[in-house]
Image (spheres, rainbow, N blue to C red):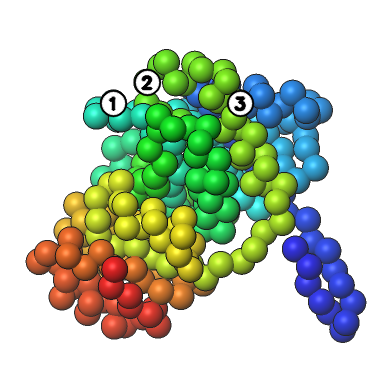
Amino acid sequence: MIMKNNNVSIYLLFMDLLIAFKNDPAGHNMAKFISNDMNKDGDVYRGKNFDLIEIDSPTISADWLDEKYNYDGFIFLSKHAAESGTLALTCHSTGNFNEAKFGGNHKELAIPYPDLQKKYMQKLWNNRESFLDFEITIEATHHGPTHLKKPSIFVEIGTTELQWNDETLCSSIAKLVVDTLETPSTPFPFAICFGGTHYSEKFTKELLFGKYALGTVMPKHALEFLNPNLFDHLLIQNTGAEAALLDWKSLGKYKQKLIDLLSTSELEVIRI
């Protein structure tokens, strides 16, 4: 990133931290590939634009990370599981709209990582011929960690142990993650999303082909928990968002409540 102060260019190096859980086969396999070109310093593998660690506890409960590690963003390398068994390569922000069933805190949303997510997903799509058996999709915001003070995102490989333990697949995804982090960032306007299913085709298409990067994605099944307090918290965690993307047909009985809350913000409301 370049900033100018009195016509003098100041180069700011942003450092991200990649995190994998040692007992997560997909995360471990991605981390193993990436760390091959890094130097280990204590428990941290050091790189030019990012560092990497493997931790002893699940990533969904890693709310403690920024108490120990000072970075500009956190990227979690993880497996993805789904009852449907559909093979999928996913990427999503984290947070709990109600109960904290899988890590994080009750009714707390993490700070999303919109630009990095868009850049990674576009690279994944541009290399889709290498992953023809997989659905390339975002997921709605879910699970922990939720309390980190810097942006975070999950990059996941699904959907069964066969894929998690496929070192060729894991190394291919790991390479795209590295390529993403080594590619200069282009800032995108970003939007908060409301409605749709857990795997939203509309929001995925916007991320891949549209104008906006995406912040928090609140699916239709979570709208019952939306209230002024949660909405204010959502806006704070998505500071800088310019728009709200609404999957209009999916909002059902929550349309008016959502419109009323959005009217109290400065977000441009866009129905898709």
Q: Tell me which label, 3 or 1, sits earlier in the chain.
A: 1
Q: Is residue 138 left or right of residue 124?
A: left
- Residue 1 place in picture, x, y as percent: 75, 63
Q: Residue furthest left?
A: 253
* Viewer-side residue, 242 vs 109: 242
State which tag comes first along the sequence, 2 or 3: 2
Q: Which residue appears at 45% of the width and 64% of the height? A: 210
Disc 1 crowd, CA 10 A, few/some/many (<14, 14-19, 20+): few
Could you say which disc has been placed on residue 171 in the image?
3
- Residue count near mark 3 (Cα–Cα under 10 Å), binned few <14, some 14–19, many ≥20: some
**Amino acid of disc 1:** Gly
Alpha carbon distance from label 2 to label 1: 7 Å
Question: Total of numbered circles in the picture?
Answer: 3
Q: Secondary structure at mark 2?
A: loop
Q: Residue at x 80, y 42 (%)?
A: 48
Q: Is residue 20 left or right of residue 6?
A: left
> What is the three-letter code of the residue carrying label 2?
Thr
